[in-house]
Image (tube, grey):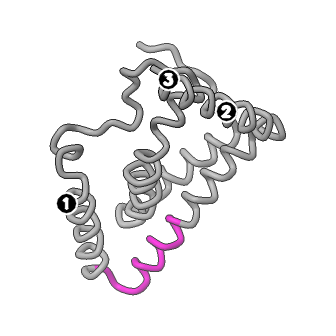
Amino acid sequence: EPESTPQSPALSAYVKQIRASSDGGLIGHLYCRYFADLFGGSMLSEPTRLALALPAECVQYRFPEHVEGARREFIEALYTSINHAGEAMDQSERDNVVEEARAAFSHNASLVRERGPAVLGLAALGLGTIASGYARRLHL
């Protein structure tokens, strides 16, 4: 069995929120995480890799070939599926999805805040590393 790493308070609260979510409410978490990774994550993958000096093989924001090969179509199909699921819900269920999405965004913000003021220093350091990484790449 893999060794377990203790969860931070913010992560524990987020996991508890997800576990307490209704099936429909999980759509709010899907919306927050998956779309954030498909849109923002894909745009930030190279700067993140450079800032953290990760190898080119880093796959954190790489998706299966059927997604990467037709990203726009995949996103539109997923978005359409979420809309169809929403149309099958009553107003109370749709309100729940919205509340779960808000909770997911809030929990993600808490995860960042939990790191405290050190995050700002790391962000500045990361920005400098990104700039130097891009500069190195341009000169190669």
Position of residue 110 measured from the top left corner of the image (x, y, whole percent): 69, 50
Position of residue 38 measured from the top left corner of the image (x, y, whole percent): 37, 51
- Quadrant that contains the C terminus: top left
Task: Determine whether, in the image, residue 102 is placed left or right of residue 30.
Answer: right
Q: Which amino acid, by three-letter code, is at mark 2?
A: Gly
- Quadrant that contains the N terminus: top left
In space, the residues marked 2 and 1 are separated at their CA atoms by 33 Å
For label 1, the crowd category at 10 Å Cα-Cα, with few meaning under 14, some 14 to 19 and many 20 or more, is: few
Position of residue 30 measured from the top left corner of the image (x, y, whole percent): 39, 56
Q: Which amino acid, by three-letter code, is at mark 3?
A: His
Q: Where is mark 2, residue-wise?
A: 126
Residue 8 vs 1, above or below: the answer is: below
Q: Secondary structure at mark 2?
A: helix
Residue drawn at point x = 40 percent, y = 45 percent? 42
Q: Where is mark 3, residue-wise?
A: 139
Q: Which amino acid, by three-letter code, is at mark 1?
A: Glu
